Image (cartoon, rainbow, N blue to C red):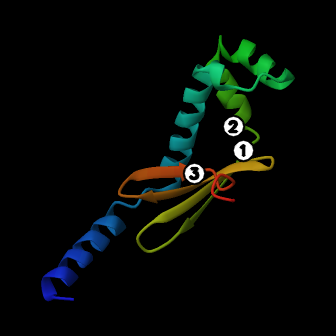
């Protein structure tokens, strides 16, 4: 690698380190996404629990989000240039990557074949 390439890598790594999000921003991101889901009840399942949530959450999405949040487990792990996060609700959950003051989440079961 040429010196200019090493410099570019060092600048990007430095920016990632300086803009790594914290655990509070992770919880805020997950909570915001949860509220968006409850604000659109048509995405929920049609089974008994889903129908009940559709009815109740159509009127008070923030209350539904707060109720579900009380059962969620959060965890983060700090790395040099990024932060990994996980949120679990029973057997379901999301894994997230935080860098450059942003979070990106994915369902780990969707990547399994």
Write the residue at 46% across / 51% down: 103
Q: Which residue is mark 1?
A: 72
Q: Quadrant of residue 89?
A: top right
Write the residue at 35% across / 57% down: 100
> For mark 2, does the 10 Å Cα neighbourhood hold few (<14), some (14 to 19), or many (20 or more) residues?
some
Write the residue at 15% across / 87% down: 3
> For mark 1, does the 10 Å Cα neighbourhood hold few (<14), some (14 to 19), or many (20 or more) residues?
few
Kindly report the distance in space between the C-alpha atoms of the residues bearing marks 2 and 3.
18 Å
Kindly report the distance in space between the C-alpha atoms of the residues bearing marks 1 and 2.
5 Å
- 48 shown above or below 17: above
Disc 3 secondary structure class: strand
Res 62 seen here: no
Q: Which residue is mark 2?
A: 69
Disc 1 secondary structure class: loop
109 and 41: which is toward the camera:
109
Please report contact status of discs 1 and 2: CB closer than 8 Å, yes or no.
Answer: yes
Q: Quadrant of residue 63?
A: top right
Image position of 82 (left or right of 30): left
Q: Which mark is residue 7?
A: none
Dot placed on the residue nearer the N-terminal end, 1 or 3: 1
In percent of width and height, residue 88 lies at 71, 50
Q: Nearer the viewer, mark 1 or mark 3?
A: 3
């Amino acid at each position: 690698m040429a010196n200019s390439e090493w410099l570019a890598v060092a600048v990007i790594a430095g920016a990632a380190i300086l803009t790594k999000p914290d655990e509070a921003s992770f919880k805020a991101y997950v909570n915001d996404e949860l509220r968006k889901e409850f604000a659109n009840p048509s995405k929920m399942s049609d089974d008994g629990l889903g129908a009940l949530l559709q009815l109740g959450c159509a009127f008070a999405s923030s209350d539904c989000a707060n109720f579900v949040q009380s059962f969620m487990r959060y965890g983060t792990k700090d790395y040099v240039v990024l932060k990994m996060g996980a949120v679990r609700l029973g057997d379901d959950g999301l894994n997230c990557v935080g860098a450059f003051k942003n979070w990106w989440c994915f369902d780990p079961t969707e990547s399994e074949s």
